[in-house]
Amino acid sequence: MTLLDRIEEYQLMVAVRTDTTESAFKAAEACIKGGVNLIEITFTVPEAEEAIKKLRRNNSVVVGAGTVLSISEARKAIQAGAEYIVSPNLDEKIVKFTKKEGALSIPGACTPTEICRAYKAGGDIIKLFPFVEIGGLDFLKVIRGPLPFIKYMLSGGVTLDNISRYLAAKASCILVGSAIIKRELVMAEDWASITELSKRFIQKIQERSMKSR
């Protein structure tokens, strides 16, 4: 099974964005305990590569880097063990570097032109961001008309109440951030509540999978 296959199977990717390296690691661990298999450590986290390096010791989780805005950051992430590189924007140089290093590339885009450019640059999955603001699920439905061959990540707006609709759209994966990594929980170091939220999201995915069989 390829990395792309695994991402499409697991569906839920959690973006961990906190103020310290240690809290990022602990929040990620809490998500993993809740059943999350895809963890993205954003490069807004101080020394994000250190959190990635520690998480890579766990073979059950696929770790990547997010908010990667430069080749320097991409290099640090990949050297730390990141298996995929996610950006909020398209930078062809980052895509090219990521592919050259053997990692999976997930650049961001929000218009038909950007989506096509990201795909032609070598993006394995195109991150639709900011998903809600560009039209959400209605936008996805429309853009798939002329561009059905592109794999999409849905980034933004997903909650426990609407994740079933996101899953029904059959994108390659769904990126969740603050719906699980709630700032107040991180500040309180309430890792158990983050684990519980993760479990509830994973349960929704499992329920949807059972219904579709």
Image: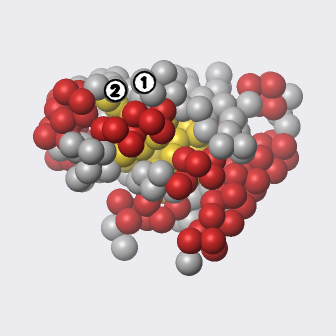
Secondary structure of residue under mark 1: loop
Q: Earlier in the sequence, mark 1 or mark 2?
A: 2
Q: Position of residue 54 (x, y in %)?
A: 56, 48
The disc label shown at residue 29, or none: none
Left or right position of 45 against 190: left
| Residue 19: quadrant of the picture | top right
Do residues under tags 1 and 2 come within 8 Å of each other at their CB atoms?
A: yes
Colour mode of the rendering: secondary structure
**Is any atom of residue 120 visible in this view?**
yes
Q: Callout 1, which amino acid? A: Ile
Under circle 2, the secondary element is loop
Residue at horizontal 30%, vertical 38%? Answer: 143
Locate the C terminus and report the quarter of the image it occupies. Answer: bottom right
Residue 67: image quadrant is: top left
Q: For mark 1, what is the residue?
A: 134
Q: Left or right? Give the position of 162 relative to 105.
A: right
Q: Residues within 10 Å of mark 2 (few under 14, many from 20)?
A: many
Left/right placement of residue 98 relative to residue 84 reads: left
In the depicted view, which residue is nearer to us: 32 or 13?
Answer: 13
Location of residue 107 by image quarter:
top left
Relative to the observer, which residue lies in front, 211 or 31?
211
Residue 5 picture location, percent across and down:
38, 65
Image point (57%, 58%), residue name: 37
Measuring 26% from the left and 50% from the top, which residue is drawn there?
A: 148
Q: How many marks?
A: 2
Residue 206 in the image, given as x and y percentages of width and height: 65, 66
**On the image, numbered disc 2 is attached to which residue?**
110
Q: Nearer the viewer, residue 18 or 156?
A: 156
- Nearer to the camera, 136 or 55: 136
Q: Residue at x 41, y 53 (%)?
A: 172
